[in-house]
Image (cartoon, rainbow, N blue to C red):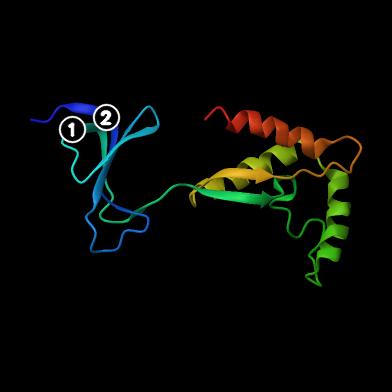
Amino acid sequence: MPEQKYSIVLRECRLLGAGDDRPRVDIAIEDDQIVAVSPRISELGEREIDIQGNLVSPPFVESHLHLDSALTAGEPRWNQSGTLFEGIQIWGERKQSLTLDDVKKRAVETLRLQASQGILFVRSHADVSEPTLTALQGLLEVREQVNRF
């Protein structure tokens, strides 16, 4: 009987760029690191997941996001024209009511939504035009919170 060696083994994975005619692979993970990729890993994992030939890819990257203003559509009003200029005007109104908890809650929720879609690396921008720097402070705290995971 095979011995248990890895924390996770993903079975029957299709890799990025691999067509249906290419062999599927198993992927072994230990300490949150991929340690083996092979057509067949004989050792067991504490957790075994059958990927059933679905695609396994590197995580996606969000390279431009404003986490401080995420999830604020319609607050304080909707952008009727759909233009950047009106959007900037609305954000100018909205940022007057920013609180640290508000920024952190929306940023974390947005990061959770992104992670659920495979986005694990995020580059965010922060509004530093308001004197208390609430948005920046909130995002710095969120960065520390999520970097622990």
Secondary structure category for the residue under label 1: loop
Quadrant of the rendered image containing residue 47: top left
Name the residue rendered at 31%, 58% in the picture.
18
Name the residue rendered at 47%, 47% in the picture.
59
User: Residue 124 in the image: x percent, y percent?
Assistant: 69, 44
Mark 1 near mark 2, Cβ–Cβ under 8 Å?
Answer: yes
Crowding near the residue tagged with mark 1, few <14, some 14–19, many ≥20 C-alpha atoms within 10 Å: few
Quadrant of the rendered image containing residue 41: top left
In the rendering, which numbered label is found on residue 6? 2
Q: Left or right of 20: which side holds 72?
A: right
Q: Left or right of 143: which side holds 69?
A: right
Q: Quadrant of the N terminus?
A: top left
Q: Nearer the viewer, residue 101 or 87?
A: 87
Is 84 above or below relative to 30?
below
Q: Give the residue type at disc 1.
A: Glu
Nearest to N terminus: mark 1 or mark 2: 2
CA gap, disc 1 to disc 2?
7 Å
Is 18 above or below relative to 25?
below
Q: Give the residue type at disc 2.
A: Tyr
Q: Nearer the viewer, residue 31 or 89?
A: 31
User: Residue 68 in the image: x percent, y percent?
Assistant: 74, 45
Name the residue rendered at 69%, 52% in the picture.
71
User: Residue 94 in the image: x percent, y percent?
Assistant: 84, 51
Is 14 above or below relative to 97?
below
Q: Residue furthest left?
A: 1
Name the residue rendered at 52%, 46% in the picture.
115
Residue underneath mark 1: 43
Can residue 112 be seen in the rendering of this structure? yes
Q: Nearer the viewer, residue 9 or 71?
A: 9
Can residue 99 be seen in the rendering of this structure? no
Secondary structure category for the residue under label 2: strand
